Image (spheres, helix red, strand yellow):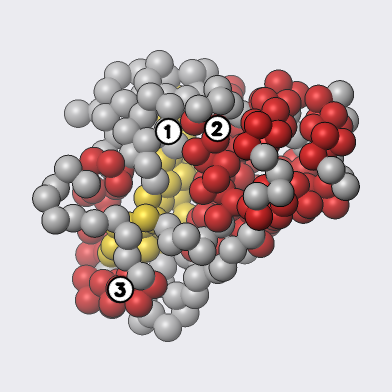
Amino acid sequence: MDAISVIRTKRDRETLTDEQIDWVIDAYTRGEVADEQMAALAMAVLLNGMTRAETARWTAAMIASGERMDFSSLPRPTADKHSTGGVGDKITLPLAPLVAACGAAVPQLSGRGLGHTGGTLDKLESIPGWRALLSNDEMMAVLRDVGAVICAAGDGLAPADKKLYALRDVTGTVEAIPLIASSIMSKKIAEGTGALVLDVKVGSGAFMKNIDDARELASTMVALGTDHGVRTTALLTDMSTPSA
């Protein structure tokens, strides 16, 4: 199998096989598939889309590229949220401690800015002394102590997504719904949380400019979470103006 044949399959509006998806994600993670080849494949996905089966397999391959976390030793149920981002979006900062105060553990693995949005980690790093990278032991200690933690996903969690996330940001392929869904859900499923709430932004300040695209993204992510045993729900929220 080779990258060119995989690119051609999606370029010609054909369906990628499970074997093609497994191979290209693994080979890209190992460096066998070059950035320019994955960029071409990402653009083909943006233009031609993916079936639900393709997206599910792509997500599973991203999860399989790394480790999975286990919070079963915590005395609380786990819950997390993810926002697709928008101008001025800061909901993580008040929400994580509020949910922890209600008795859940919130392992909030947040992201960097993508496209025109600023990421939660980028905002928090403006605080002197705050650091995004925690070891698994440090994360578990904070969760046991205060019930919530906001940090970056470790290098071992869906490493394929870490590479592809950065590539999409510089190749004009951020808006591809299958790639957004698989990026978000591969990390959240690998994270191992028991329940997940998705905040899908729609409007001029978000990636999804219209309600139909936002609804498609939301339904895709809910299906991925449900198929992997994570109780998942999604809300469509307005991002036509910056959040206060």
Which label belongs to residue 114?
1
Number of residues whose C-alpha sits closer than 10 Å to that of mark 1, classed few (under 14), some (14–19) or many (20 or more): some
Numbered disc 2: secondary structure:
helix
Q: Is residue 218 above or below residue 242?
A: below
> Viewer-proximal residue, 126 or 71?
126
Q: Amino acid at mark 1?
A: Leu
Number of residues whose C-alpha sits closer than 10 Å to that of mark 3, classed few (under 14), some (14–19) or many (20 or more): few
Number of residues whose C-alpha sits closer than 10 Å to that of mark 2, classed few (under 14), some (14–19) or many (20 or more): many
Which label belongs to residue 168?
2
Q: Position of residue 159 (x, y in %)?
A: 55, 55
Which label belongs to residue 138?
3
> Viewer-proximal residue, 103 or 134?
134
Q: Quadrant of residue 75?
A: bottom left
Q: Is residue 131 above or below residue 172?
A: below
Numbered disc 3: secondary structure:
helix
Does residue 214 appear anywhere in the picture? no
> Viewer-proximal residue, 144 or 6?
6
Q: Amino acid at mark 3?
A: Glu
Tell me if 229 is positioned left or right of 238 in this view.
right
C-alpha span from label 1 to label 3: 27 Å
Numbered disc 1: secondary structure:
loop
Residue at (55% x, 22% y) in the render? 172
